[in-house]
Image: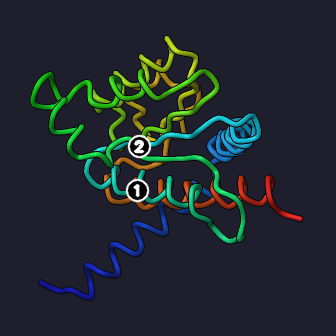
Amino acid sequence: MDSRRIIKERLTRHQEAVNRLLSDESVQQIIAQVVDVIVDCFRKGNKVYFCGNGGSAADAQHLAAEFSGKFYLDRSVLPSEALHCNTSYLTAVGNDYTFDIIYSRLISGVGRPGDILVGLTTSGNSKNIVEAFKTCREKGITTVALTGMAGGRIAPFSDYQICVPDNDTPRIQELQITIGHIICELVEEIIFGN
């Protein structure tokens, strides 16, 4: 195995994915719209929730912490949390019911009209996130999906869908966290910047 060749190939693939995102004005426009929607949500006293599975769950938790903690600015809390952080809840509902409803059941209890649920799913087909988005539609909760270029089954249940222009899971995840950081930075700056 030629490690240096593989390292160079992966970095090149990452750079190519970034370049596709950089040249995709429609995706950038949706990102800007999502920033405005999140700013409005926080200004009205609502919350932003995140969900994902596996690595996307880790990224969801990371982004929730950027809002509830801080990004660049020393400022007040922006109320945000990831729905998967209570492992007792997840394992109880997964065991007693099904893993497919872990997010829909929780958002039905904690979510309020005017809140936002951001779902990270590289395929766009994660059943538990699709079910949560269906519940949000019934409750008046805005949905934002971060997916790969295929979009997936979540598309018709998404108010906003940011489709990373790639179909390789690691590249999608890399760009989802980049997009998430851009959103967090802009939201923080608009609300708290000078």
57 left or right, relative to 26:
left
> What is the CA distance from the residue labelled 2 to the residue labelled 1?
8 Å
43 left or right, relative to 144:
right
Say which residue appears at 22% left-offset and 26% top-offset. 100
Total count of labels:
2
Q: Give the secondary structure at mark 1.
A: helix
Question: Can you say whether 158 is above or below 178 in the image?
Answer: above
10 left or right, relative to 46:
left
Which label number is shown at residue 174? none
**What colouring does the structure picture have?**
rainbow
Q: Quadrant for the N terminus, please.
A: bottom left
Q: Which residue is mark 2?
A: 120
Question: Can you say whether 126 is above or below 72 in the image?
Answer: above
Which label number is shown at residue 59? 1
Indicate the position of residue 44 as horizontal and vertical percent values: 75, 34
* Amino acid type, mark 1: Asp
Indicate the position of residue 69 as horizontal and vertical percent values: 57, 63
Q: Quadrant for the C terminus, please.
A: bottom right
Indicate the position of residue 64 as horizontal and vertical percent values: 50, 53
Question: Viewer-proximal residue, 178 or 54?
Answer: 54
Q: Give the secondary structure at mark 2.
A: strand
39 left or right, relative to 159:
right
